[in-house]
Amino acid sequence: KKDLGNPSFLNELVQYDKDANLNDQMISRVSKFTSLPEFEPEQVGKQSGAAKSLCLWVRAMVLYGRVAKNVAPKKAKLRQATETLSKKRAQYKAAQDELQAVTDKMMVLKTKYDESVSLKERLLAESAELEAKLDRAQRLVGGLGGE
């Protein structure tokens, strides 16, 4: 009754740190009362509306504590999986960057290769043309030399 009359009591309930304060020992101590048939919200509500609301809050906190106990390992597993995913994404990004660098280098080398092949073909064509000119010049000189 004393706490129900406290003007900040409702605020204390709203700001109750359930994650820090609801441990197995607390839940088992409170469960002794919440399992009683007299602690049903309808039964308590016959005595007092405020007590009914408090009864509902206590039951909700016990339920939250039990659920949080089951969810905590799953949250830890999720956190670990998220960290692993983040590391794998970073590795993937690094591999993609490395692949891009290799691809860029390959494109530069391919361009140089294509230019070199083009130069080679041009030089071969020029060489064949010069050989033909040299052959004609030799024949001309040979023909002029016989006169």
Image (cartoon, grey):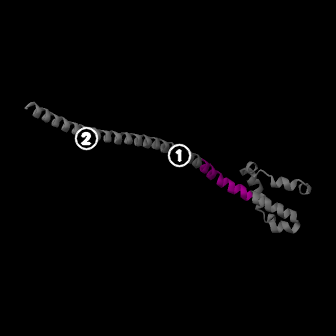
Asked if labels 1 and 2 touch by Cβ distance under 8 angstroms, the answer is no
Depicted 90 relative to depicted 140: above or below: below
- The residue lying furthest to the left in this view is 146
Mark 1 — residue?
Answer: 88
Depth check, front residue: 143 or 62: 143
Mark 2 — residue?
Answer: 125
Task: Determine the secondary structure under disc 2.
Answer: helix
Give the quadrant of residue 125: top left
Magenta segment: 62-79
Is residue 102 found left or right of 116 in the rendered image? right
Give the quadrant of residue 129: top left
Residue 78 belongs to the span the image colors magenta: yes
Residue 42 at x, y percent in the picture = 81, 69
- Kind of residue sitting beneath label 1: Lys
Of the image marks 2 and 1, the number of the one nearer the N terminus: 1
- At x 74% / y 48%, what residue is drawn? 20
Depth check, front residue: 1 or 89: 89
- At x 87% / y 63%, what residue is drawn? 50
Depth check, front residue: 101 or 38: 101
Dot 2, how many residues are within 10 Å of its Cα: few (below 14), some (14-19), or many (20+)?
Answer: few
Which of the image's four quarters has the N terminus?
bottom right
Depicted 145 relative to depicted 23: above or below: above
Is residue 61 found left or right of 111 in the rendered image? right
Residue 14 belongs to the span the image colors magenta: no
Residue 118 at x, y percent in the picture = 32, 42
Is residue 46 found left or right of 144 in the rendered image? right
- At x 13% / y 32%, what residue is drawn? 141
